C-alpha cells in the first residue's frame, strides 16, 4: 500500500503515505465529499493504529475519519477501489485516459472541419462540437450530407451562413437533449491537475459502480419497480423539511408570563428581593406552508413524484395547504386530511380533480389563489411551487407571482427542468425574479434543496 | 485507558453486543484518537446500546444526555442553585454578615452539575452518551462541539474547568436533520445499519438462547424479509426482534407458523398502517412459506 508508483507529466510524484492520502482526499473532494484538513490529520493518525498491509482495515480507518455522511459512503467505496490499486492497473488506467483524450480531440477536429461554409468556420461553441462528437454515426452523416448539399448550391452566398448556423445549432440542441447524460459526464470530468487522478476518476465514472442511482436519475425515468424506494426517499426528505419547519420558533418581545426561574436568578444580585421581573418570551405560530403543484400535460411525466411529494409533506407537516393547478386552481388539502393510505388518497384526488393533464395557466391559478384563498397568504407563509415553468401568458403570470411575493414570506420554486435547460426557457428568468428557484429534476436535487438553509433562517 | 483491538472485540462479545469487525475497528479508532464517536442509522439498530455496551466493557459510569428541542446549556452543562443562594443570603442577613456572602455565592458549593459538566469533572474516565443529538437545536449543537473539541468549559464566575479524564463520548443521531459540519468534523463517524441474517441469528442466540436453532434462524429470516419492504415505515428494530423471539418462546413455539405470525404481529410492527401493508403485501402464510423455502 505504501509503494504507489505515480507519474504526472513525466514527473515522479512523491511516493509516501501522507502524499497518497492527501491525493486520495483530493479525489474524494473532487467527487463532492466535504473533507476538512483536521479530518485528513485524523485519517493519518488513525492509520497509525491499523496494519497497512490489511486493505480492509485501512479502508475502515479512512472511512471512519473521512466520511461523515451515509450517502458519501458510496462515493468513498468507489474511489477507494480505484485509487488503491497496484501500479500496473494505474498505468493501464492512465493509458486508457490518454486514448480517450486523443479520441475526443480527433472528434472535435473532425467537427471543426465539417462545420464550414464557403471555406469559413461556423460560429459554434465547444459544447456544440462535443455534442456532434457524441452523435450517432448515421445522424452525423445526415448532418454532413445536409451541409455538403448547401455547399454545392451556388446560389447560396455568405449571407446564408447565419441561417445555416441557426439550423445546425437547432439540430445540435436537439441532440444535446437526447444525449444529455453522456454530454454531462464529459463536461463534469473536470481536470484535477493530476493526470493519474484524472485517469482514476474516469475509470470510476465509467465503472457503473454506484453510477446510476435512483438519486441521480431524472424523476420521470424512475421505474415502477423503483417507486417504493423513491417514495421512501421522498418521505425521508419531507420529514427533514418538517423538522426544519417545526424548529423555526421566534420569540416575541411582548411581555406576557413572568419567568420564575429567571426572576429568582436576577434577584440574587439584589439580596433576594425580586427587584427585576423577568418574563417568559412567547412562541409565535409555526410558519404556514402552501404547496402549489403543476399537474398539467407537460408535468404528467412527473406526476408520481408530485403526488408522492404532496402526500409525504401532508403526512408530516400539520399546517399545510395543498393545491394542484393546470388551467385552473383546485384545493386538494381535504383529500390528505382523511388519513388514508397513499393509493386510496391518490385515486380519489386523480378521479375527482379535473386538472390532470390539462394545459397550464399559472396566471389563472395564481389569480384564483389570491382571490379565493387570500387569508392563507400572510407574512408567515412559505409557498412551494412545483412546476416546469411552462405556461401560457407567462408575462401576466410573472406579474401575479410578483404580487404573491409581496404577500408571503417567501416563494420556493422546485423546477423539474434540468438546470442546463433553464436558459432555453424565458419563463425561468421571468419567474426567478420573484421566486427562489431550485432544480428538482432528480431526487438528489430534491435532497439538496431540502437541506439548504432557506427554511432555517 | 489503553485497550487493544482484540480486547475490545472480546469486550463487546462479553457485553452481549454483537457487531461486525468494521464497527469494532471504528470504535477502537475513536478510543485511540480520543474523539467522540458519532453513530447514525435508522431507529432500533443499537446506537444507544453502543454507549451502554462501552460502559459495561470499561466498567465505568454511563452519563446520558437525552437531547430534545429546546435543550440548552442550563440543562446540559450547569446551573446555579438559586434557592440555595437565596437561602444563604437570607441566613447571612440574619447573622449580620451580609457583605461577606457575595463572593461565596458563586462557588462550587452552589453549582448544579448537569451531564456534560458531570462527565468532565468525573474522577475517572466515564462514557458520555449524547443521545439523539439531531433532536437538539443548531445553537445547542454549536455549543456542544465547542465542549467536545477541547473537553473544557468556561463558567464566567469560576473560570475554565478542564476535563480530568477525557470521557468516551458517543453521540447518536437518527438523521432527522443534517448535523453541522463542525460537529461532524470533530467526530469519528459510524453508520450502523440493520444487521444481516447471520449477524441477527448470532444476536438472537446471545440474547434469547432458549429460542433454539431452527426458530432463531426463521425469526432472523422473517424479520429480514419484512425489513426489505419499502412500504413499511417503521422497520422492526433489533429490540423488537428479540421481543418477538421471547414472545414465541413463551408460546412454546419451535418454528414459525402463519397463524402465530399473525397473532404476534403487533410485537414487530407497532402501527396500523405498517400492519396493513404487511397483510396486503407480505401476508403471514406467504411469509411462512418463504422462510421454509429459503431454509430448505
Image (tube, rainbow, N blue to C red):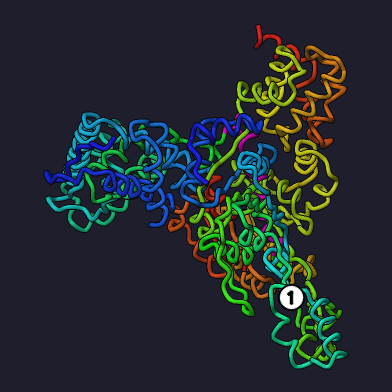
Helix or strand or loop: what does disc 1 sit on? Answer: loop
Q: Nearer the viewer, residue A384 or B113?
A: B113
Q: Nearer the viewer, residue B245 or A408?
A: B245
Left or right: B117 as drawn, with respect to A284 = left
Q: Taking B165 as reference, is A375 above or below it? A: below
Q: Is residue A120 visible?
A: yes
- Give the image location of residue A54, x and y in percent: 37, 30
A218 in the magenta segment = no
Q: Nearer the viewer, residue A221 or A101?
A: A101
- Give the image location of residue B244, x and y in percent: 79, 26
Give the quadrant of residue B200: top right
* Residue at x 65% of width, y 63% of height: B117
* Residue at x 50% of width, y 48% of height: B188
A234 in the magenta segment = yes
Specify start and end residues of the magenta stretch as a single range: A223-247
Magenta portion: prevailing SS class: helix
* Residue at x 77% of width, y 18% of height: B210
Q: Please name the residue that numbered disc 1 is placed on.
A: A251
Q: Residues within 10 Å of mark 1 (few under 14, many from 20)?
A: few
- Give the image location of residue B130, x and y in percent: 65, 53
Q: Is residue A303 visible?
A: no
Q: Chain of mark 1?
A: A
Q: Residue furthest top?
A: B296
Q: Taking B268 as reference, is A201 above or below it? A: below
Amino acid at each position: 500500500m505504501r509503494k504507489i508508483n505515480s507519474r504526472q507529466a513525466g514527473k515522479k510524484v512523491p511516493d509516501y503515505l501522507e502524499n497518497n492520502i492527501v491525493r486520495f482526499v483530493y479525489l474524494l473532494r473532487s467527487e463532492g465529499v466535504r473533507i476538512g484538513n483536521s479530518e485528513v490529520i485524523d485519517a493519518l493518525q488513525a492509520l497509525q493504529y491499523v496494519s497497512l498491509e490489511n486493505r480492509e482495515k485501512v479502508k475502515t480507518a479512512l472511512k471512519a475519519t473521512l466520511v461523515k455522511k451515509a450517502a458519501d459512503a458510496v462515493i468513498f467505496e468507489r474511489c477507494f477501489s480505484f485509487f488503491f490499486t497496484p501500479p500496473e492497473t494505474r498505468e493501464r488506467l492512465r493509458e486508457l485516459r490518454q486514448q480517450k483524450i486523443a479520441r475526443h480531440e480527433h472528434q472535435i477536429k473532425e467537427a471543426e472541419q465539417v462545420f464550414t461554409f464557403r471555406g469559413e468556420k461556423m460560429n459554434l461553441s465547444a459544447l456544440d462540437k462535443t455534442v456532434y462528437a457524441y452523435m450517432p454515426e448515421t445522424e452525423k452523416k445526415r448532418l454532413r450530407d445536409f451541409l455538403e448539399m448547401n455547399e454545392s448550391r451556388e446560389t447560396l452566398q455568405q449571407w446564408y451562413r447565419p441561417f445555416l448556423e441557426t439550423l445546425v445549432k437547432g439540430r445540435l440542441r436537439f441532440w444535446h437533449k437526447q444525449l444529455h447524460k453522456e454530454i454531462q459526464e464529459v463536461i463534469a470530468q473536470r481536470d484535477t491537475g493530476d493526470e493519474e487522478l484524472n485517469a482514476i476518476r474516469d475509470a470510476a465514472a465509467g465503472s457503473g459502480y454506484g453510477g446510476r442511482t435512483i438519486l441521480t436519475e431524472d424523476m420521470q425515468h424512475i421505474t415502477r419497480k423503483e417507486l417504493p424506494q423513491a417514495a421512501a426517499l421522498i418521505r425521508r426528505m419531507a420529514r427533514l423539511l418538517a423538522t426544519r419547519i417545526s424548529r423555526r420558533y421566534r420569540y416575541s418581545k411582548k411581555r406576557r408570563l413572568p419567568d420564575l426561574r429567571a426572576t429568582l436568578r436576577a434577584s440574587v444580585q439584589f439580596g433576594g428581593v425580586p427587584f427585576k421581573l423577568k418574563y417568559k418570551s412567547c412562541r409565535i405560530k409555526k410558519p404556514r406552508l402552501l404547496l402549489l403543484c403543476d399537474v398539467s400535460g407537460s408535468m404528467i411525466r412527473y406526476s408520481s413524484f408530485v403526488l408522492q411529494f404532496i402526500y409525504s409533506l401532508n403526512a408530516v407537516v400539520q399546517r399545510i395547504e395543498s393545491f394542484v393547478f393546470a388551467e385552473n386552481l383546485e384545493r386538494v388539502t381535504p383529500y390528505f386530511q382523511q388519513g388514508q393510505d397513499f393509493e386510496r388518497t391518490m385515486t380519489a384526488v386523480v378521479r375527482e380533480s379535473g386538472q390532470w393533464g390539462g394545459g397550464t395557466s399559472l396566471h389563472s391559478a395564481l389569480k384564483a389563489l389570491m382571490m379565493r384563498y387570500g387569508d392563507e397568504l400572510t407574512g408567515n407563509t412559505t409557498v412551494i411551487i412545483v412546476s416546469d415553468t411552462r405556461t401560457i401568458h407567462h408575462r401576466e403570470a410573472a406579474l401575479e407571482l410578483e404580487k404573491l411575493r409581496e404577500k408571503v414570506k417567501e416563494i420556493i420554486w422546485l423546477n423539474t427542468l434540468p438546470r442546463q435547460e433553464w436558459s432555453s426557457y424565458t419563463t425561468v428568468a421571468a419567474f426567478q425574479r420573484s421566486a427562489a428557484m431550485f432544480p428538482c429534476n432528480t431526487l438528489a436535487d430534491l435532497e439538496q434543496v431540502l437541506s439548504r438553509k432557506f427554511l432555517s433562517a | 485507558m489503553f485497550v487493544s483491538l482484540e480486547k475490545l472485540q472480546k469486550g463487546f462479545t462479553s457485553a452481549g453486543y454483537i457487531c461486525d469487525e468494521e464497527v469494532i475497528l471504528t470504535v477502537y479508532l475513536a478510543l485511540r484518537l480520543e474523539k467522540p464517536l458519532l453513530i447514525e442509522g435508522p431507529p432500533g439498530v443499537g446506537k444507544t446500546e453502543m454507549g451502554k455496551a462501552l460502559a459495561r466493557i470499561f466498567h465505568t459510569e454511563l452519563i446520558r444526555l437525552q437531547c430534545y428541542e429546546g435543550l440548552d446549556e442550563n440543562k446540559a452543562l450547569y446551573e446555579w442553585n438559586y434557592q440555595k443562594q437565596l437561602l444563604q443570603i437570607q441566613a447571612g442577613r440574619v447573622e449580620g454578615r451580609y457583605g461577606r456572602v457575595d463572593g461565596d455565592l458563586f462557588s462550587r458549593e452552589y453549582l448544579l452539575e448537569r451531564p456534560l459538566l458531570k462527565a468532565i469533572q468525573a474522577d475517572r474516565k466515564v462514557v458520555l452518551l449524547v443521545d439523539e443529538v439531531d433532536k437538539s437545536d443548531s445553537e445547542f449543537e454549536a455549543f456542544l462541539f465547542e465542549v467536545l473539541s477541547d473537553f473544557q468549559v468556561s463558567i464566567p464566575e469560576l473560570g475554565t474547568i478542564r476535563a480530568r479524564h477525557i470521557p468516551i463520548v458517543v453521540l447518536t443521531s437518527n438523521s432527522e436533520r443534517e448535523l453541522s459540519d463542525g460537529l461532524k468534523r470533530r467526530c469519528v463517524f459510524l453508520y450502523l445499519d440493520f444487521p444481516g441474517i447471520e449477524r441477527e441469528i448470532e444476536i438472537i442466540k446471545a440474547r434469547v438462547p432458549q429460542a433454539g436453532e431452527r426458530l432463531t434462524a426463521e425469526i432472523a429470516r422473517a424479520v429480514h424479509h419484512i425489513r426489505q419492504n419499502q412500504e413499511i415505515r417503521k422497520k422492526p428494530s433489533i429490540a423488537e426482534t428479540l421481543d418477538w423471539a421471547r414472545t414465541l418462546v413463551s408460546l412454546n413455539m419451535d418454528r414459525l407458523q402463519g397463524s402465530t405470525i399473525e397473532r404476534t404481529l403487533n410485537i414487530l410492527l407497532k402501527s396500523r398502517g405498517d400492519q396493513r401493508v404487511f397483510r396486503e403485501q407480505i401476508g403471514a402464510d406467504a411469509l411462512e412459506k418463504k422462510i421454509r423455502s429459503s431454509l430448505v
